[in-house]
Image (cartoon, rainbow, N blue to C red):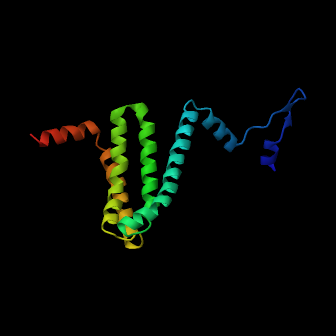
Amino acid sequence: MAASAEKSAAPSSNGQEVAKRPGLLSSWISNLTGHENFRRFARFGLVDQSFLIIGLLSGFQLDSVFTKYFGVRGYGPVLGAAFGNCAADVIASTAEGGQAAAGIMIGTLLPISPLIGAMAFKVPLQGRAQYVIGGICVGIIGATFYNKSTPDHELSEESSSSTK
């Protein structure tokens, strides 16, 4: 009962109604959309996801070509989505400069290599192959976050001192 009274308009001491307090969700959305980078990040998300979907749909079309040349089905949509994501991320990162774009391109292409290897060896993309490839990707994610605990400049100093 007290909660409903809090949400409704109540008369003030001068007889005028006081506006309702915004709810938690509408307040959160208002704060989120009012952030200076919201539109920029929303545009990035729209473009990024659109490239991923275009790549996925293109991969469905190319799956018959992959099946003809490699003798296994199912790799087209996965590779299409992966390359679509790569294209979106590289295009988005060009604003940060060529070095950032090159690093992001390499970072998005490396996880694709187990897929290409499995496809080259004509391993059907089902059952155990899905678990192995997924496990490799989880390992890549884990290794990436594990290495984040060491600052990049320390890693470069370690590698340069080990080559001497």
Residue 29 at x, y = what percent? 65, 40
Residue positioned most to the right: 15
Determine the image quadrant of residue 76: bottom left
Residue positioned most to the left: 164
Whether residue 10 sits left or right of residue 23 in the image: it is right
Residue 53 at x, y = what percent? 53, 52
From what the image shows, is residue 97 above or below residue 67? Answer: above
Residue visible at 33% across and 39% down?
Answer: 102
Determine the image quadrant of residue 68: bottom left
Whether residue 113 sits left or right of residue 160 in the image: it is right
Residue visible at 33% across and 69% down?
Answer: 122
Residue 109 at x, y = what percent? 35, 50
Q: Identify the image quadrant of the C terminus.
A: top left
Whether residue 30 sits left or right of residue 100 in the image: it is right
Task: Out of 79 and 151, give the one closest to the viewer.
Answer: 79
- Counting the numbered discs, the total is 0
From what the image shows, is residue 86 above or below residue 67? Answer: above
Residue positioned most to the top: 14
From what the image shows, is residue 86 above or below residue 123? Answer: above
Residue visible at 30% across and 68% down?
Answer: 121
Task: Out of 13 and 116, give the one closest to the viewer.
Answer: 116
Residue visible at 36% across and 63% down?
Answer: 133
From what the image shows, is residue 120 above or below residue 26? Answer: below
